[in-house]
């Protein structure tokens, strides 16, 4: 970052990435061209967290950076090629993603490590994260109960855990391995307040209260992994109190080995949320590094689509 | 098809991919020389070349060419195969 800005952790992480992968410097420069101060501030904090997590890994920060490079060059490239040739994601069924990816622990470790770094270095990921920190979390009322479905690397829960006014924080996942990874990350980051991580299948879980018992639910980069994202959001909304918020972050045109549901743009993301019977409060679209939204839309490039929705106080007639 | 004709066609395709009609390439041109020739646009370029020349690249061939000259050589080899 420019001298005078307070982004020491970001500078440190970027310097380490460029030292390890010099050819990535140009991409990083483009990725930071359009980040305003609020996004830089969140990215800097994310960089601090990534450096701590990387430092605790077997391969250290350098190993983490190698995994990030592996993600960019080896994991995503064949998927991008398929997407550009055929206009579809390579896989369509959850069972195929399970077989090819989720059941392959060494692969998943490298994949998840790469994505961890992407939260800082990819413009769309960084902007979506800032929207969560500064747009979603402050909306939760004092004493709120917050749930994240599929907390993965644990970064979103880490930021939620720093909100002292939240009374209850939970994370649900169907994978014991994922739950273990999230717990490990929160422990390494020194989160001391209770964060209840549960092995829960969203589709099977009855709400604790008939009317739902969470003030806010987050589904970040979850829907594209599911065959029926609308059904997943409907299931999630059963756990929301009336008037509670669902914050969705779903990538459009973003081929990956475990992405099976293709969202074709921001409007599609909004439509999916509405189809789940939720009221859209606001939405935002963050194009991939180096692209304007207009260019990303025209070229079908990756766009992170963020939708903040509310559970109606009265059930929708179409629900 | 000779190398000059292939390179001219690649230039035409690249101009379309990066939305820049002023792009001029030589055998020595590398991706870093062209604004917007990033990894995603490189894949778009490769797929457009496949369609134009009716050839197919293997996945490991996509990032192999280090310059336009290498890419032209690769296309020419595939056309001759």
Image: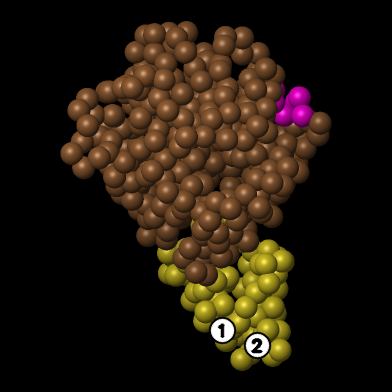
- Which chain's colour is yellow? B
Name the residue that disc number 2 marks. Answer: B79
Spot occupied by residue A139 in the image (x, y as percentages of width and height): 34, 19
> Is residue B40 in the magenta section?
no
Badge 2 local density, few (<14 within 10 Å), some, or many (20+)?
Answer: few
Chain for mark 1?
B
Identify which residue, A235 or A35, lies in the foreground: A235
Spot occupied by residue A279 in the image (x, y as percentages of width and height): 25, 34
- State which quarter of the image contains the N terminus of chain A: top right
- State which quarter of the image contains the C terminus of chain A: top left
Q: Residue at x 29, y 29 (%)?
A: A310
Could you say which disc has been placed on residue A191 in the image?
Answer: none
- Which chain's colour is brown? A
Identify which residue, A175 or A74, lies in the foreground: A175
Name the residue that disc number 1 marks. Answer: B53
Residues in magenta, as a range: A50-57
């Amino acid at each position: 970052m420019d001298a005078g800005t307070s982004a020491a952790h970001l500078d440190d992480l970027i310097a380490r990435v460029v030292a390890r992968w010099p050819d990535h410097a140009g991409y990083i420069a483009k990725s930071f061209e359009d980040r305003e101060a609020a996004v830089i501030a969140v990215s800097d904090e994310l960089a601090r967290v990534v450096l701590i997590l990387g430092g605790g890994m077997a391969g250290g920060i350098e190993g983490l950076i190698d995994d990030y490079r592996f993600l960019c060059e080896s994991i995503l490239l064949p998927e991008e090629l398929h997407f550009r040739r055929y206009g579809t994601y390579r896989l369509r069924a959850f069972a195929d993603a399970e077989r090819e990816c989720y059941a392959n622990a060494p692969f998943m470790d490298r994949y998840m490590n790469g994505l961890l770094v992407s939260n800082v270095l990819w413009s769309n990921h960084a902007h979506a994260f800032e929207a969560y920190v500064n747009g979603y979390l402050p909306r939760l009322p004092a004493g709120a109960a917050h749930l994240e479905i599929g907390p993965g690397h644990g970064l979103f829960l880490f930021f939620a855990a720093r909100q002292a006014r939240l009374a209850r924080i939970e994370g649900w996942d169907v994978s014991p391995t994922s739950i273990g990874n999230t717990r490990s990350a929160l422990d390494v980051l020194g989160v001391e307040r209770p964060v209840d991580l549960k092995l829960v299948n969203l589709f099977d879980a009855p709400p604790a209260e008939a009317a739902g018992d969470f003030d806010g639910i987050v589904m970040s980069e979850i829907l594209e992994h599911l065959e029926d994202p609308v059904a997943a959001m409907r299931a999630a909304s059963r756990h929301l109190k009336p008037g509670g918020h669902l914050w969705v972050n779903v990538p459009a045109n973003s081929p990956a080995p475990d992405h099976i549901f293709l969202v074709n743009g921001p409007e599609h993301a909004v439509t999916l949320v509405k189809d789940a019977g939720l009221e859209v409060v606001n939405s935002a679209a963050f194009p991939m590094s180096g692209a304007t939204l207009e260019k990303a839309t025209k070229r079908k490039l990756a766009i992170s689509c963020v939708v903040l929705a509310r559970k109606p106080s009265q059930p929708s007639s179409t629900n | 098809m000779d190398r000059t004709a292939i390179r001219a066609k690649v230039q035409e395709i690249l101009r379309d991919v990066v939305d820049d009609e002023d792009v001029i390439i030589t055998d020595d041109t590398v991706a870093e020389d062209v604004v917007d020739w990033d990894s995603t646009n490189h894949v778009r370029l490769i797929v457009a070349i496949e369609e134009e020349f009716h050839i197919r690249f293997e996945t490991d061939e996509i990032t192999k060419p280090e310059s336009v000259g290498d890419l032209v050589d690769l296309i020419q080899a595939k056309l001759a195969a």
